[in-house]
Amino acid sequence: MSHADLAKGLQGYLHRKGWQIYLDWEDNTLPERPDRRTAEKIQGKIRDLEMFFFLATQNSMASRWCPWEIGYADGVKDLNRILVIPTRDARGVTHGNEYLQLYRHLDELARAVSATSTRPETGTA
């Protein structure tokens, strides 16, 4: 599955859960050739949106922009607002560089949610 297919699938899933997801390559207001305006627009979106999701695919790891984007997010967002979504290719290879271990991963979040949902509820009636 391509990076674009994964990103669109994730966008659709999160949209059904009530999230609005920004994909920069869908933004028709960005210049055709990346320049300073591109960087400023992406910086603004990273600052303004509640969460920064980093879809770690072979393409995003090879990109010149994606590592810059997560680096920028690191400087302006609380670390709890950055979430790495790891992917595996057909050979079972997980994509991502060492520095992505600095951030929460979707699989870690799923484990945390699962652990809290299995705890018995306490309270008074």
Image: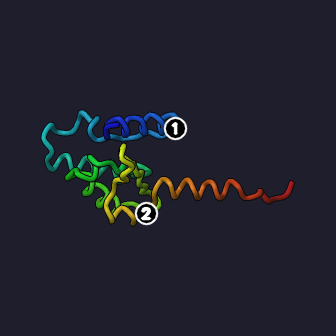
Quadrant in the picture for residue 96 = bottom left
Residue at 33%, 65% in the rendered image = 99
Disc sitting over residue 79 in the figure: 2
Q: Could you give the CA–CA distance between mark 1 and mark 2, rounded to whole angstroms?
A: 22 Å
Q: Amino acid at mark 2?
A: Leu
Q: Secondary structure at mark 2?
A: helix
Q: Amino acid at mark 1?
A: Gly
Quadrant in the picture for residue 20 = top left
Residue at 39%, 66% in the rendered image = 102
Q: Position of residue 59 (x, y in %)?
A: 26, 46
Few, some or many residues within 10 Å of mark 1 (<14, 14–19, 20+): few
* Residue, far front: 91
| Mark 1–mark 2 CB contact (< 8 Å) | no
Quadrant in the picture for residue 23 = top left
Q: Is residue 38 above or below residue 83?
A: above
What is the number of callouts on the image?
Answer: 2
Q: Is residue 107 above or below residue 14?
A: below
Q: Which residue is mark 1?
A: 18
Q: Mark 1 vs mark 2: which is more N-terminal?
A: 1
**Which of the image's four quarters has the N terminus?**
top left
Q: Position of residue 38 (x, y in %)?
A: 20, 46
Disc sitting over residue 3 in the figure: none
Q: Position of residue 71 (x, y in %)?
A: 29, 61
